[in-house]
Amino acid sequence: MKPSHLLVLFTLLLFATEARAISVSISQTGTAGNSCTRTLTAAIGSGSGNYTYTWSIISPAQSWPTTNNVSSVNLALSQTVDVNVTVHDITLNQYASATVTVNRILTGSFNTFIPNLITPNGDGYNDNWIVTASDKTLSPINAFTYTLTIKNASNVQVFAASNTITASCLGIIGGDINWNARLNGTGSIVATGSYTYALYLQNCSNTTTSTGTLAVMY
């Protein structure tokens, strides 16, 4: 074979190898704030189809918590981490890597302070009944769903509200749950007296209903 033919053949082989060079990205599902599992899938471009997979948590560094050497994994971690996958094309002996941030899921106990007084007189103090974090700040309370009902002394419901947080891994924030002492939230201010509340909270490992009494005073 002529040297020129060998050069053409080598060029073609090199081009074919480069054309088959692998690349990888990570797709992620279960990213909503009320999802309790994050599913990661290594999506490979080109390559031979003969792969090994190495998943790892690179920040903050920790042991891999589930099955490895698979193309798709499920994670349910209580902290946000950066996950890396390295794919080895065994046939071509090529490597490719990708990294993605995986948000925590909400688990564990709830972080709430529930007041027992509301004074809707417009003086700027306790005008609203506000559920905050346990340190009385507007920090996350570790839940993604709440349902609240408030009833008067005759057991008649005067207010109800509920919500499920899907857009943030922080979940419900202190201050998201509140009442302005008005009938159904928009009517006239309710009469002074004693009212009862029932607050249902949910995350990926717990549900609870807190009940108690709050006083409306002017």
Image (cartoon, rainbow, N blue to C red):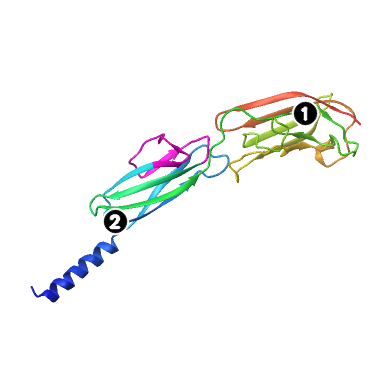
Which image quadrant for residue 203? top right
Residue 96 circle label: none
Task: Judge from the rendering whether residue 80 lies leftward or rightward of residue 48; answer left or right.
Answer: right
Q: Is residue 79 magenta?
A: yes
Tell me how many marks there are: 2
Q: Is residue 84 above or below residue 46?
A: above
Please name the residue shown 65% across and 34% down the image: 141
Q: Is residue 19 magenta?
A: no
Residue 43 locus on image (x, y percent): 38, 52
**Residue indicated by mark 1:** 115
Q: Position of residue 69 (x, y in %)?
A: 32, 41
Q: Quadrant of the C terminus?
A: top right
Please identify the quarter of the rendering in which residue 124 is found: top right
Q: Which type of secondary structure does the marked residue at label 2 adopt?
A: loop
Q: Earlier in the sequence, mark 1 or mark 2?
A: 2
For this rendering, which residue is in front, 23 or 146? 23
Residue drawn at x 25%, y 62% as measured from the top left: 17
Residue 102 sits above or below residue 9 on the image = above
Q: Please give the label number shown on residue 47.
A: 2
For disc 2, the neighbor class at 10 Å (few under 14, some 14 to 19, many from 20) is many
Give amino acid for label 2: Gly
Label 1, label 2: how many angstroms apart (C-alpha)?
A: 61 Å
Part of the protein shown in magenta:
56-80
